[in-house]
Amino acid sequence: MKANRKIWIKLRMTKANDGRRKLSDDERENIRRLHKENIPIREIARMYEKKCSRRLVQLVIFPERAEVIAKRAVEVKRWEPYNTKELRKPVMRKYRAKLKAIYGIIERYK
Protein backbone atom coordinates (compact mmCIF):
# COMPACT_ATOMS: atom_id res chain seq x y z
CA MET A 1 0.00 0.00 0.00
CA LYS A 2 1.34 3.39 -0.92
CA ALA A 3 2.11 5.95 1.78
CA ASN A 4 -0.38 8.30 0.15
CA ARG A 5 -3.24 5.85 0.64
CA LYS A 6 -2.29 5.13 4.25
CA ILE A 7 -2.91 8.72 5.29
CA TRP A 8 -6.40 8.75 3.72
CA ILE A 9 -7.38 5.55 5.50
CA LYS A 10 -6.52 7.10 8.87
CA LEU A 11 -8.33 10.40 8.25
CA ARG A 12 -12.08 10.17 8.54
CA MET A 13 -14.87 12.68 8.21
CA THR A 14 -16.79 13.25 11.42
CA LYS A 15 -20.55 13.72 11.56
CA ALA A 16 -20.13 17.42 12.24
CA ASN A 17 -17.95 17.94 9.14
CA ASP A 18 -19.77 15.62 6.77
CA GLY A 19 -21.34 17.72 4.05
CA ARG A 20 -23.75 14.95 3.04
CA ARG A 21 -25.65 15.22 6.33
CA LYS A 22 -28.30 17.90 6.10
CA LEU A 23 -29.58 17.56 9.65
CA SER A 24 -27.72 16.96 12.89
CA ASP A 25 -28.90 14.38 15.42
CA ASP A 26 -30.34 17.15 17.62
CA GLU A 27 -32.34 18.54 14.72
CA ARG A 28 -33.69 15.08 13.92
CA GLU A 29 -34.80 14.63 17.53
CA ASN A 30 -36.41 18.07 17.44
CA ILE A 31 -38.39 17.12 14.31
CA ARG A 32 -39.65 13.94 15.99
CA ARG A 33 -40.60 15.90 19.10
CA LEU A 34 -42.47 18.52 17.08
CA HIS A 35 -44.40 15.80 15.26
CA LYS A 36 -45.38 14.18 18.57
CA GLU A 37 -46.74 17.59 19.62
CA ASN A 38 -49.16 17.32 16.64
CA ILE A 39 -47.47 19.95 14.50
CA PRO A 40 -48.13 19.17 10.80
CA ILE A 41 -45.29 17.92 8.63
CA ARG A 42 -45.61 20.88 6.25
CA GLU A 43 -45.20 23.33 9.09
CA ILE A 44 -42.15 21.47 10.40
CA ALA A 45 -40.73 21.49 6.85
CA ARG A 46 -41.21 25.27 6.71
CA MET A 47 -39.19 25.61 9.92
CA TYR A 48 -36.31 23.71 8.27
CA GLU A 49 -36.92 25.17 4.80
CA LYS A 50 -33.32 26.31 4.26
CA LYS A 51 -31.79 23.03 5.47
CA CYS A 52 -33.87 20.19 4.03
CA SER A 53 -36.93 19.18 2.05
CA ARG A 54 -40.35 18.11 3.24
CA ARG A 55 -39.53 14.59 2.06
CA LEU A 56 -36.53 14.40 4.40
CA VAL A 57 -38.73 15.55 7.28
CA GLN A 58 -41.13 12.72 6.44
CA LEU A 59 -38.27 10.21 6.35
CA VAL A 60 -37.02 11.37 9.75
CA ILE A 61 -40.48 10.95 11.26
CA PHE A 62 -41.25 7.66 9.49
CA PRO A 63 -37.97 5.68 9.11
CA GLU A 64 -39.81 2.66 7.65
CA ARG A 65 -40.40 4.73 4.51
CA ALA A 66 -36.65 5.26 4.19
CA GLU A 67 -36.12 1.50 4.39
CA VAL A 68 -38.58 0.94 1.51
CA ILE A 69 -36.76 3.55 -0.58
CA ALA A 70 -33.39 1.94 0.18
CA LYS A 71 -34.64 -1.51 -0.84
CA ARG A 72 -36.05 -0.11 -4.07
CA ALA A 73 -32.74 1.62 -4.83
CA VAL A 74 -30.89 -1.69 -4.45
CA GLU A 75 -33.35 -3.46 -6.76
CA VAL A 76 -33.02 -0.81 -9.46
CA LYS A 77 -29.26 -0.34 -8.86
CA ARG A 78 -29.74 3.41 -8.76
CA TRP A 79 -26.08 4.15 -8.01
CA GLU A 80 -24.60 2.54 -11.13
CA PRO A 81 -24.74 5.51 -13.53
CA TYR A 82 -22.98 7.70 -10.94
CA ASN A 83 -20.23 5.32 -9.91
CA THR A 84 -17.88 5.60 -12.89
CA LYS A 85 -14.19 6.36 -12.71
CA GLU A 86 -14.50 9.61 -14.66
CA LEU A 87 -17.20 10.97 -12.36
CA ARG A 88 -15.55 9.75 -9.17
CA LYS A 89 -12.15 11.44 -9.70
CA PRO A 90 -13.23 15.06 -9.16
CA VAL A 91 -15.50 14.06 -6.29
CA MET A 92 -12.64 12.33 -4.46
CA ARG A 93 -10.32 15.29 -5.10
CA LYS A 94 -12.87 17.63 -3.55
CA TYR A 95 -13.36 15.26 -0.58
CA ARG A 96 -9.63 14.94 0.05
CA ALA A 97 -9.17 18.72 -0.20
CA LYS A 98 -11.85 19.11 2.45
CA LEU A 99 -10.08 16.58 4.69
CA LYS A 100 -6.81 18.46 4.21
CA ALA A 101 -8.50 21.70 5.23
CA ILE A 102 -10.07 20.10 8.31
CA TYR A 103 -6.92 18.36 9.55
CA GLY A 104 -4.52 21.08 8.42
CA ILE A 105 -2.49 18.94 6.05
CA ILE A 106 -0.34 21.22 3.93
CA GLU A 107 2.36 19.05 2.40
CA ARG A 108 1.58 16.48 -0.22
CA TYR A 109 2.40 12.85 0.50
CA LYS A 110 4.07 10.87 -2.26
Image: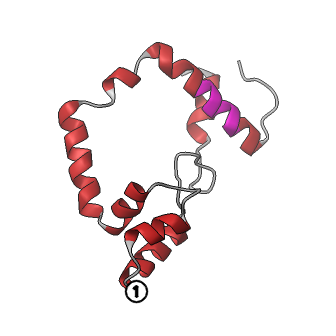
Q: Which residues are magenta?
A: 92-99
Badge 1 marks a residue whose secondary structure is loop
Q: Position of residue 93 (x, y in %)?
A: 63, 25
Q: Residue at x 39, y 23 (%)?
A: 83
Structural crowding at the residue carrying mark 1, measured as other residues with C-alpha within 10 Å and reported as few (<14), some (14–19) or many (≥20)? few
Residue 26 falls left or right of residue 65:
right
**Image: 3 above or below 36:** above
Q: Position of residue 19 (x, y in %)?
A: 58, 46
Q: Position of residue 86 (x, y in %)?
A: 49, 13
Does the magenta run of residues contain 81? no
Looking at the rendering, in which quadrant would you find the C terminus?
Answer: top right
Given the image, on which type of amino acid does mark 1 rest?
Glu
Tell me the residue that label 1 is attached to.
Answer: 37
Q: Nearer the viewer, residue 13 or 38?
A: 38
Q: Main secondary structure of the magenta part?
A: helix
Q: Please count the marks in the image.
A: 1
Q: Quadrant of residue 1?
A: top right
Q: Nearer the viewer, residue 34 or 106?
A: 34
Q: Quadrant of residue 38?
A: bottom left
Residue that protrudes farthest toward the right in the picture: 106
Q: Residue at x 63, y 51 (%)?
A: 17
Q: Position of residue 106 (x, y in %)?
A: 82, 31
| Picture colour scheme | secondary structure
Residue that protrudes farthest toward the top in the picture: 86
Residue that protrudes farthest toward the bottom in the picture: 37
Q: Residue at x 41, y 17 (%)?
A: 84
**Image: 72 above or below 17:** above
**Image: 56 above or below 101:** below
Q: Residue at x 29, y 31 (%)?
A: 78
Q: Nearer the viewer, residue 7 or 66?
A: 66
